[in-house]
Amino acid sequence: MKVVLKHLTKIFPSRDKKNDQDVIAVNDFDFEIPDGKLVGLLGPSGCGKSTTLYMISGLLTPSSGNIFFGDTDVTALTPEKRGVGLVFQNYALYPHMTVLQNILFPLQNLKGAQKMSKADMLKQAQEAAKLVQIDNLLSRKPSELSGGQQQRVAIARALVKMPRVLLLDEPLSNLDARLRLQTREEIKRIQQTTKITTVFVTHDQEEAMSISDIIVVMKNGIVQQSGQPQNVYDDPVNLFVAKFLGTPPINVLQGKVVDSKLYINDELIMNVDGVSDQEVTVGIRPEGFIPNEKGELSCKLSNLEVMGRDVSVVSTNPASLNPTIRSIIDSDIKIDTTKEYVKYSIKRNKLFLFDIKDGNRIRFEV
Ligand code: ADP
Ligand code: MG
């Protein structure tokens, strides 16, 4: 089921007497979620992710704009009529019911033509339980399950009605690191098996990048960029997106362009043909630094952090807008830690220029 958002906007009226500014939680969201894909909705807390999701589900009514499932305008339909499955951050299972009863619950509430026989309900619940691999836990109560198992029950409950669209709001944030990893792989597998169009909301860029076919990056209710995770990472449209994606984050420095040449401090870093003379914000991905005695950029060495496969070199530079510069180097390359400075050449495709005022990308000829 393709899901189309057309100029979707949600304004919450201010209830604060001292501050009468209305909150524009979602501002003109215009997007098409292709059939059968998993879209990761990504952005910092408060950027409008949940509001968007609840409008798709029908729990919130948009202030303006429309939502289509396929070619049908569902904007005025109730959540029940839309056929969506919703999973929240806190699993919200019924504590007095068993796992099976929890999963059966949405089916027992079906009315009219949708009403099902007991045997059919049981069969469908068992299938959903099997899909999320909790079919051996059906007679337990939620309190007798781990966090990860509880979340699987919540997912089974959302899947049991065979929803046309699956909506997940930060479904992993209550799990510990290992379970988070495992459950996210699980969600990916379930999504690929069922081919249900899915929207996955998270503030965790790594989670979104790893699980999504397409990511949508939001800020202050406004979509900044969308695309395949790798493409967005490799080609950010502005400084916000560049900073939001990637761990360790992109390094940000002040620079200037004179005669199509980029300088950081007084060091000539590279030719940037097509850019007019101006001060710029320079972003360099951690993997864009190549240690090289004859390199263009000098940084003062602070320390090395060994991570096994890679080494993270921590250094400083007067032009850096962050306290330190962090580069990721293959651990086979040895850094001479007796030296005060480390010199780098910079990979051309790992360096981005941004407008110092609005943060928009300034492109140069690669
Ligand atoms: P996210 O899920 O990305 O953290 P939300 O969609 O929950 O963000 O919220 C977006 C903005 O809308 C925030 O500024 C939030 O305070 C505001 N907001 C959300 N729900 C309401 C509400 N019911 N009433 C007023 N403001 C709200
Ligand atoms: Mg939220």
Image (spheres, grey):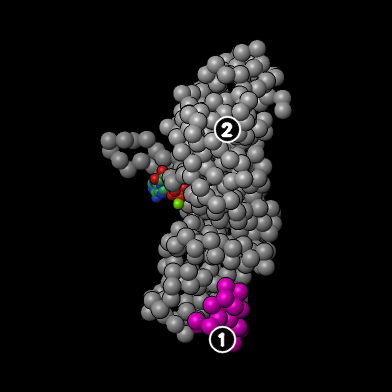
Image check: 298 left or right of 25? right
Q: Is residue 125 visible?
A: no
Q: Secondary structure at mark 2?
A: strand
Image check: 193 left or right of 256? right
Q: Nearer the viewer, residue 213 or 165?
A: 213
Q: Residue 24 placed where, x, y %? A: 45, 40
Residue corresponding to mark 2: 284
Mark 1 Cα shell of 10 Å, populated few (<14), some (14-19), many (≥20):
few
Residue 118 got which mark?
1
> Is residue 120 inside the magenta stretch?
yes
User: As shown in the figure, which amino acid type bears the numbered disc 2?
Assistant: Ile
Given this view, does label 2 or label 1 mark the residue nearer the observer? 2
* Quadrant assignment, res 258: top right
* Residue ID at (50%, 36%): 337
Q: Earlier in the sequence, mark 2 or mark 1?
A: 1
Look at the numbered discs 2 and 1 and tell me whether their residues touch, using CB distance below 8 Å: no
User: As shown in the figure, which amino acid type bears the numbered disc 1?
Assistant: Lys
Q: Secondary structure at mark 1?
A: helix
Q: Is residue 170 visible?
A: yes
Q: Nearer the viewer, residue 40 or 29?
A: 40
Q: Nearer the viewer, residue 346 or 258?
A: 346
> Is residue 43 inside the magenta stretch?
no
Q: Nearer the viewer, residue 357 or 115?
A: 357
Q: What span is colored magenta in the figure?
A: 115-138
* Mark 2–mark 1 distance (CA, rounded to whole Å): 60 Å
Q: Residue 203 placed where, x, y %? A: 49, 49
Outermost residue on the front side: it is 338
Outermost residue on the left side: it is 18
Outermost residue on the right side: it is 366
Image check: 297 left or right of 22? right
